[in-house]
């Protein structure tokens, strides 16, 4: 069933039967400018996607984020990977919202529009799309975790499991 949203005119999720078949969620957006921009972003490929969204300047290094987490001063951290990936281990304290849900489940985001949010996925493309979604919703300080979960894990940084 379509969900009305002020920034995304129509968005549709998966029906229960599609989930059972293992289909992936689909975001259907009926806004020509948004559809065109998403298409451009997806066409760039994973190696260049992050730099296309919100600029490349707002990044957070893993060690710096870990230090903020340990000090209790971390910004909101948002894991936009799948539920299975999140359950397999995530950055300690990270909230979970799959990237395709950023437009349709805004009420679940644990931050105000002015609070910084650090977004990550496994390698970068999904986080870049989530960042685009968050910025289109009016979030002003969306940062990317440098290296995402793949680097966090490779560096031996702590993981949390639900």
Image: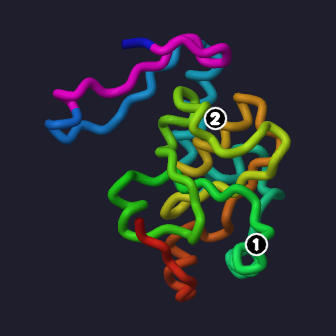
Residue on which disc 1 sits: 72
Residue pictured at 73% horizontal, 52% vertical: 117
Q: Which disc, if any, is residue 100?
A: none
Residue sitting nearer the eye, 98 or 52: 98
**Dots 1 and 2: beta carbons under 8 Å?**
no
Q: Is residue 115 left or right of residue 10?
A: right
Residue sitting nearer the eye, 157 or 74: 74
Residue pictured at 79% horizontal, 37% vertical: 113
At which x and y percent is residue 11? 48, 19
> Which residues are drawn in magenta?
3-18
Assign the N terminus to one quadrant of the image: top left
Residue pictured at 42% horizontal, 60% vertical: 86
As drawn, which residue projects farthest toward the bottom?
A: 156
At which x and y percent is residue 69? 70, 73
Based on the displayed image, in which of its 4 quarters is residue 26 positioned? Answer: top left
Based on the displayed image, in which of its 4 quarters is residue 24 positioned? Answer: top left
Secondary structure at numbered mark 2: helix
At which x and y percent is residue 35? 56, 22
Q: Is residue 1 above or below residue 137?
A: above
Q: Earlier in the sequence, mark 1 or mark 2?
A: 1
The CA span between labels 1 and 2 is: 27 Å
Q: Is residue 17 above or below residue 3?
A: below
Secondary structure at numbered mark 1: loop
Q: Is residue 35 above or below residue 152?
A: above
**The stretch drawn in magenta includes residue 100:** no
Q: Is residue 58 left or right of residue 25?
A: right
Disc 2 residue crowd, few under 14, some 14–19, many 20+, Cα 10 Å: many
Q: Which disc, if any, is residue 133?
A: 2
At which x and y percent is residue 41? 59, 39
Q: How is the image coloured?
A: rainbow
């Amino acid at each position: 069933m379509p969900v009305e949203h002020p920034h995304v005119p129509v968005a549709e999720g998966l029906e229960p039967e599609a989930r059972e078949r293992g289909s992936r969620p689909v975001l259907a957006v009926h806004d020509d400018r948004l559809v065109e921009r998403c298409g451009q972003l997806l066409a760039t490929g994973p190696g260049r996607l992050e730099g296309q969204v919100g600029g490349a300047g707002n990044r957070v290094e893993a060690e710096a984020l870990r230090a903020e987490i340990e000090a209790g001063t971390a910004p909101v951290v948002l894991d936009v990977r799948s539920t299975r990936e999140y359950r397999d281990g995530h950055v300690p304290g990270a909230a979970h919202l799959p990237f395709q849900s950023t437009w349709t489940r805004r009420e679940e985001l644990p931050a105000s529009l002015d609070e910084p949010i650090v977004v990550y996925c496994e390698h970068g493309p999904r986080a870049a799309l989530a960042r685009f979604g968050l910025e289109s919703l009016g979030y002003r300080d969306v940062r990317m975790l440098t290296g995402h979960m793949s680097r966090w894990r490779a560096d031996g940084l702590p993981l949390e499991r639900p």
